[in-house]
Image (cartoon, rainbow, N blue to C red):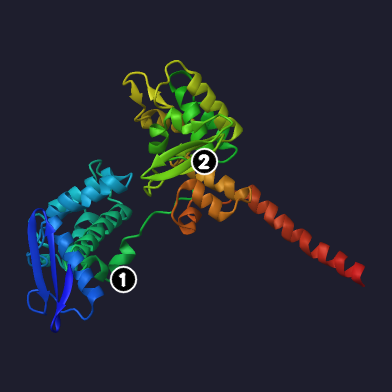
Amino acid sequence: MIRKRGKFFEYEFMEGGKRFSGTFNGKKDKMTSSKKEARDFASAIRVAVRNGTYGKEEGSDTFAGLFDSVYMKYAKENTADWKHAECRGQVLKDFFAGKTFREIKPLAIIGFANDRLNSTTKRGTTRSPVTVSKEVALASAVFRMAISDRVATENPCASLGLAMKRRLPARNKRDRVLSRVEEPKLFAQFVGRRAHLCSIVRLAMDTGLRKSELCRLEVQHVNLTQESRFFTIDSKRVDLEPNSLLVVKSKSGKPRTVPLTAEARRIAEIQIADAATEKYLFGSRRRGSMIREFKTAFVAAVRDAGLDDFRFHDLRHTFASRLNESGADPFVIRDLLGHSTVTMSSDYTQTSSETRQRAIGILNNAPRRITEKLRKLG
């Protein structure tokens, strides 16, 4: 409840069986100039009470404490890659052990970044600047949440100098795709103990799904019928049209549907008809659940095919690039990949030499067509 007495607004509410009240007079609580502002401040106080931060001095909470109790709870409920956040968060918690938000300044963030950039991985390789960039981005997200909950007053990650920002690229833009010449060489390796990879790799190339999305793909989320199916995901209705598959939760946390090519449909039909297939389209016969890892077999196939610097995720790049070459709209490519922006999708698309040659061929023919048109007009 908000009411005005004299010059000041007062608030009162019940939370957890306890009564909370105060006056926005600039002493204990901030001064307010309108009832709407008083209502917003009272709502923020109620949130602080629920989070257990009410009455604490801003910045006195520890980074690790809020990360575990607030940020990870949000990540598990709203993101698909929360396990990545958990791993990166452990690195941050170890570095800022016992530190409060008030104690972590921009120099501390720079110190963390430099320490990580100068460290090596468990394999003894140089740590990628992109990895460190993601860790700093996570720290920034935690600070933003802390500011929203009135636990912190500023975000030190937003004050990094230009020199440090240049050392921390948001991502590496790879331009590796599977060429038409390389494709048969790779698929020739999927025989014997690697035969199961043939369907997985082909479906990845024809749908653009990430490896984790392929592993989690359930039979019920592949619609081979002539009628639409309907699912409720996060209280929202999602239509799965005929001849399509559904990714329940993309990396962005949102669902998306992808139409099936003729080859993708054939693979889905074979997998579903397999007597060993139960819940997941690609199940593990040993575990009786979804297939979890096939990196060793894929890396060996790539090596034996004589392909240089090719990773499983590059199949997704190949899917995007072939869509681009076919003239697909950038926004369509964005939605099929499950990206939030067209800019991100553009990093996944490259042009082949054949496409570039066709483009030059069009330019070569353009002057001749213009000359012929002018001749007709004359």
Q: Compared to 8, does 321 lie above or below? A: above
Q: Earlier in the sequence, mark 1 or mark 2?
A: 1
Please name the residue shown 23% across and 69% down the image: 40
- Name, please, the residue furthest toward the bottom: 7
Task: Give the alpha-carbon distance from disc 1 to disc 2, as whole Å.
Answer: 40 Å
Pick the residue in front: 119 or 322: 322
Disc 2 crowd rating (10 Å Cα; few below 14, some 14-19, many 20+) is: many
Q: Quadrant of the C terminus?
A: bottom right
> For the residues carrying marks 1 and 2, which lies nearer the camera in this image?
2
On the image, the x and y values in percent for residue 70 come to: 18, 52
Residue drawn at (53%, 43%), measured in percent from left and top?
319
Residue 16 image offset from top left, x and y in percent: 10, 53
**x and y percent of residue 38 in the render?**
20, 73
Q: Is residue 208 visible?
A: no
Image quadrant of residue 148? bottom left
As shown in the figure, which amino acid type bears the numbered disc 2?
Val
Q: Where is residue 269 drawn, in percent x and y? A: 53, 24
- Whether residue 337 is situated above or below residue 243 in the rendered picture: below
Residue nearer the viewer, 166 or 317: 317
Q: Amino acid at mark 1?
A: Leu
Identify which residue is drawn at 73% across, 57% down.
Answer: 362
Q: Which residue is drawn at the image coordinates 50% and 55% (left, top)?
A: 346
Most distant residue in the top direction:
275
Q: Which residue is mark 1?
A: 162
Q: Quadrant of residue 298?
A: top left
Q: Is residue 170 above or below residue 263?
A: below
User: Is 46 located above or below residue 195 in the figure?
Assistant: below
Q: Quadrant of residue 36?
A: bottom left
Q: Secondary structure at mark 1?
A: helix
Q: Foreground residue, 269 or 123?
A: 269
Q: Residues within 10 Å of mark 1 (few under 14, many from 20)?
A: few
Q: Is residue 166 left or right of residue 194?
A: left
